Image: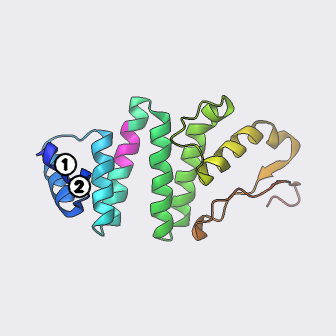
Amino acid sequence: MLQTARLAAERRSWVEAFEAYTTVDRGQPLGPEDLDQLAKAAWWTGRPNDSIAAHERAYAKYVERGDVEQAAFVALTLRREHTVKLDTSSANGWLARAVRLLCFKARKNEIRSGLAGSPVLETVIVTCRVSPCARSKGIRIRWPLISTGTEKPNAVRRVSPSNPR
C-alpha cells in the first residue's frame, strides 16, 4: 500500500495518494519523506489542517534524524501554510524555527544549493550573519511582512532602547 501511495503522489493523483498514505499511516509510522508527501496530498485535496499536522510530524522526524536543512525547509512550508490561514503568530514561529536551524550553517556557508535562491532563505542568511553582533550594537533586522507573502529582506536598521521597533 505504501508503494501505491508513493506512485499516486508521483503521478500527482492527490486524492488517491491522500487515501493511500492515510491508510498506511494508521498501521505503521511513516518516514519524514512520506509524511511530506501525505502533507502535499492533504494540501492539494483541500485539507489544510491535515497538511499542517503531517508537516509538523515530518519536521519532528527530520530534526530527530539530524537533517537540519530539510527540517528548515518544512518549517518554511509550515510558515507558508499558516500564512495562508492568516495565522501570523504561528507563521512567525515556524519562520523563527527555520532561522534557528539554519543560522549555524548560514554562518559557515554550508547551505545546499537546493535551498539557495529562496527569498525567505536569503532573509534567514542575512539575519544570521548580522545577528551575532547586532544585539550588542543596537541593530535589529526588520522581518518581512509575513501576512502579505512578500519575503524580500528589509533593511537592517539601528534601534534604541526608547524605540525598540
Q: Nearer the viewer, residue 52 or 43?
A: 43
Read off the residue under disc 1: 7
Picture layout, residue 114 above or below residue 15: above
What kind of residue is marked 1? Answer: Leu
Residue under the image location 60 percent in, 30 percent down: 110
153 relative to 19 in the view: left or right: right
Label 2 element class? loop
Q: Secondary structure at mark 1?
A: helix
- Which mark, residue 134? none
Nearest the eye: 73 or 161: 73
Look at label 2 and name its amino acid: Arg
Expressed as whole percent of the image width and height from the top left, the position of residue 83 reads 51, 66
| Viewer-nearest residue: 82 or 2 | 2
Image quadrant assignment for residue 137: top right
Q: Which residues are magenta?
A: 56-61
Mark 2 closeness class: few <14, some 14–19, many ≥20 residues within 10 Å: few
The residue tagged 2 is 11
Mark 2–mark 1 CB contact (< 8 Å) = yes
Q: Quadrant of the C terminus?
A: bottom right
In the picture, measured across the screen, residue 26 lies left or right of residue 125, that is left
Residue 142: within the magenta?
Answer: no
Residue occupying image coordinates x 30% and y 50%: 37
Measure how far apart labels 2 and 1 are at the Cα level. Answer: 6 Å
**Within the magenta stretch, is there residue 59?**
yes
Q: Residue at x 21, y 60 (%)?
A: 13
Q: Position of residue 31 (x, y in %)?
A: 28, 38
- Mark 1 closeness class: few <14, some 14–19, many ≥20 residues within 10 Å: some
